[in-house]
Image (tube, grey):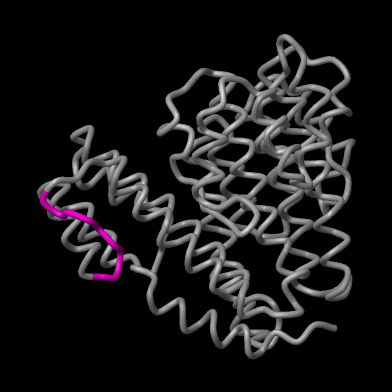
Amino acid sequence: MTRWDDLNARARGLSTRLLGRAALEGLCRAPDLPAIAAELQRRGFPIDDPDRVSAGGLELAVRRNLGARLATLIRWAGPRAAALAVLIEDEDRRSVSALLRGATQRAPAEQRLSGLLPTPELPERALEELARQPSAGAVASLLTVWRHPFASTLLPEATKPEPDLLRLETALGRTFAGRALAQARRDGRGGILYRYVQQVIDVANAFAALMLSTEQAAHVEEQWLSGGGVISLELFQRAVATGDPAAAGRSLAQAFTNREVGKAFATGGSRQNGLERAVLSAQIDELRQSSRLAPLSSAPLLSYALRLRAEALDLRWLLWGHRLGAPPLALVEGLVTAQ
C-alpha cells in the first residue's frame, strides 16, 4: 500500500495558492483584461507586461504557471511518481484528444491549446509543437518520435486519409484505461486511487454514449471501454439505443454511485460543454469529502490535481468571456470552482 501522507501535506500547501471561488468571481467582474492581468500578477502568475495583454497571452501564462505546479508535485513524489502516472496520463489523454480534434477541424493553434495543462511528458513546448501540426497523422507521428506511450495506439487510425475522431479517442481512452488501472492496482483494488480510475473510465463511457446516441452508429460495442465500475456494456448499448442525449443521460445517471455526477448526467445530457464542467465539479466535491474521511489516502492529492484542472478551465472561461464581452453574471455562473 502506497503511503501518501507527506505528499498530501505538500498538495495541501500548494492548494493555498489556488485562487478559490471568491478570487475567480472577482476576476469575472474585472473591468478589462489589463485589470485581470494585474490581479493575476499580484497572485504569483508571471505576466510580462500587465498593460499590454491578450486573452491568448494570459492563458499561456496561466498554463505555464499551473503546469509548473504540477511538475513540482511530481518531483516531490520521488519513487511514487509511477503511481502518479494516473494523474499525468489523464492530463495527457485530455491534451492529445483536444489536439487531435483541433488538427482534424483545422483549428488555429492557439485554440487547440486552450484549457490544457502541461505535464512532464508533454511540457508547454511539446504542446505548442503538437498544436502546429497540420493533421491527426502528423500529431501521432510526432508523439511516436517522442516515444510517448499513447503514440502506437493512435497511428493506425490517425494516418488514414480521413481518420475517424471517435475511433481515435476510443483508442486513446483504451490505452489510458489499461495503463491507469495497472498503476492504480499498486495502491490496492479497494483504494481510492483505483476507484477514481474506474470513475474516469465510466465518465468517458458515459460521454461516448451521449455522443453515439445522436448517430446511427454500427458496432457500438467497439467504442466502450472496459475497466469501469458501473457503466457496463449492456447499459452503454441501452443508452445509445435511446437515440436522444437527454434520455441517454437519464439512463446513465442511475448507475453512478456519486449522486452529483449522476445528477449532472440526468439534467445535462444534451449540453456537453456544461456537462463536462458539472461532472468535474462533482468529482472535486466527492474527493473533498473523501479527503475528510480518509486524510491519509490518495484523495487529497487527487483533489488538488482536479482543482488545478478546474482553475485552468475557469481562467480560460473568464479570459475569453471577457474578450468576447460576456456579462459578469454569466461568467460567474459558468465557474467550476466551488470554494
| Quarter of the figure that contains the N terminus | bottom right
Q: Residue furthest front?
A: 145
Q: Position of residue 164 (x, y in %)?
A: 73, 18
Q: Main secondary structure of the magenta part?
A: loop
Question: Number of marks in the image?
Answer: 0
Q: Position of residue 290 (x, y in %)?
A: 64, 77
Q: Is residue 148 left or right of residue 290?
A: right
Q: Is residue 84 left or right of residue 21?
A: right
Q: Position of residue 35 (x, y in %)?
A: 13, 55
- Residue at the spot 83% in from the left edge and 36% down from the top edge: 152
- Residue at the spot 70% in from the left edge and 80% down from the top edge: 78
Q: Is residue 40 left or right of residue 186?
A: left
Q: Nearer the viewer, residue 259 or 288?
A: 288
Please check the rendered image and state whether residue 70 is part of the magenta-colored stretch, yes or no.
no
Q: Position of residue 304 (x, y in %)?
A: 54, 71
| Quarter of the figure that contains the C terminus | bottom left
Q: Nearer the viewer, residue 44 or 335?
A: 44
Please give the range of residues in magenta: 43-51
Q: On the image, which quarter does residue 119 sit in? A: bottom right
Q: Is residue 196 left or right of residue 76?
A: right
